[in-house]
Amino acid sequence: METRTLPGAAPAVVVRGLRKAYGGAEVLAGIDLDVPAGGVFALLGPNGAGKTTLIDVLTTLVRPDAGTAEVLGLDVVRRARRVRHVISATGQYATVDEELTGRENLVMVARLLGAGRRAARDRAAALLERFDLADAADRRVAEYSGGMRRRLDLAAGLTGSPAVLFLDEPTTGMDTRARRALWRTIGALAADGTTVLLTTQYLEEADVLADRIAVLDRGRIVAQGSPAELKDRVGGEWIELSLADGGTERVPGEATADHLRRVLDERHRAGIAVSRVAVRGPGMDDVFLALTGNGGGRP
Amino acid sequence: MSLLRAERVMTGRCLVRSLRDPDGTVTAVVAPVAIMLLFVTVFGAAMEDMAGGSYVEYVTPGVMLLCAGFGAAMTATAVHADLSTGVVRRLRTMPVRASSVITGHVAASVLRNLLSTAIVLLVAVALGFRPQAGPLEWLGAAALVAGYITVLTVLAAAWGLASGGPDTAATFAFAALFPPYLSTAFVPVEGLPGFLHGVAAHQPVTPVTETLRALTSGAGPGEHAWAAVLWLTALGLAGAALTGWLFRRAAGRR
């Protein structure tokens, strides 16, 4: 995926020197971050890296100790009320009311945002349809599956058509099917022009979804770039040889035709039978490990 | 048009929740009936002498306040639940007064418990209670009960906000049961043991009960009305300030 930033477009999020400590423990230790408008931006990091705190600051829930953060040019502390008009945040915990039906939840959010009764009902119906919840619309949320709840949560977050959408670990605890379905939904949102900033501890998620990734570790951004750029930083590709005796061999270096021919000729002369050849590059796992000294989680 | 919109929406939400919650319905409807029957039929005969007349006449205002107070106290658990799930978090990221979640609970509690009080009154009438209040006195009685419910609900909300867990939050409903018993709601002062005289004479439930009793009996607000109003105003303001402070603290904790 390429970054859909228009040249000259105002960035969605700009963070400078952001710090936050809780009881002496520094959770954010000086964050600088630029999130371009449009597309999906992933904050990748292990548990406790500071992802949720950073999202909390950006969504006006928490005041930073130092530094500045702006969303669409609006300071999140001084202009918190304006910021709340252009963002939406969906947290790790479902924010919908279990005793109400899916429809009632969405109508409630639309009403809170100022829609009249009729408009709120129409908006709710459209969102239920879009998130494949129309059949369950009039059931209480307590009867929903985890995946349905997340979809409803996301629908609630989109009721006000936010320009910037914050998703804190949107797929944590989901099964593979539900996760992939949500990835498609998030991708579609970004394609419609919403800027999505999500946190994840899943490398695959960042790799598949994000146009740009910032790797967060112990309150600092340790790397920023596109998935391809990050992989490049860890090292180039290598040739993987599957040997006839069942072993494998890794040969570093770019897989040019010359290099490949040379490698195979050498093996041939030495009497080593090579059955298969594959060209490999670093995965996000390697990136994560190299940058944080931590394997991270897997979906 | 959009005046207090968030508050109205959140009140509606709490009312729908109350209707759907079987425990809430039992508390609001069945418990008042049961308690009224219990006091009048079980204790009634034994209490006639002490109350100086029909016990149902004496005890009805007390049971009204007992039930209203117990219902209001349920707010502690509801507020705590909203805080521990993501409801408050979501509201705080929206262009909406987040405190509307608390205001909604309080308003819904007042409406729910006024209904519950009306049910007590109907059962009381069926058991022989004959209120003599005129229109103004009824208005005063309704305002007094609404005020009592509001104050207890606000205190319950504060307790719910301060609670570390749902069990702690639930203890408020239990605690709310006691003050009426230690007042003149069920037994006149002279019928209480000596060491309780001071407590009963100087705690807020006594003037509120006595004023409600005076109003429903058609005797006007009576001599305790000022004490009742002052108590409710003072507790209400203190409770609101405490709730506001606790809400800002709890909401900003993460």
Image: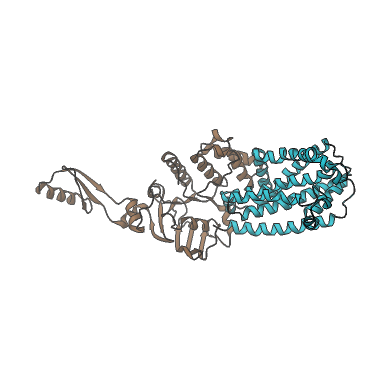
Chain colours: A brown, B cyan
Which of the 4 quarters of the picture holds residue B162? bottom right
* Residue A67 located left or right of residue B224: left
Q: Position of residue B149 (x, y in %)?
A: 74, 49
Q: Is residue B5 among what the camera can see?
A: no
Q: How many numbered discs sit on the rendered protein?
A: 0
Query: Residue shown at 72%/38% (left/top)?
Result: B29
The location of residue A206, given as percent across then percent down, is 40, 50
User: Depth check: A24 or A220 in front?
Assistant: A24
Foreground of the two, A207 or B241:
B241
Q: Is B58 on the left-hand or right-hand side of A233?
A: right
Give the image location of residue B211, x and y in percent. Answer: 84, 51
Nearer-the-camera pick, A197 or B202: B202
Residue at (42% x, 60% y) in the render? A218
Viewer-side residue, A230 vs B128? B128
Q: Position of residue B31 (x, y in %)?
A: 72, 40
Residue B110 higher or lower than A60, as above or below: above
Q: Which residue is depicted at the point 23% across and 53% down?
A: A254
**B188 left or right of A218?**
right
What quarter of the picture does the C terminus of chain B occupy? bottom right
Q: Is residue A28 visible?
A: yes
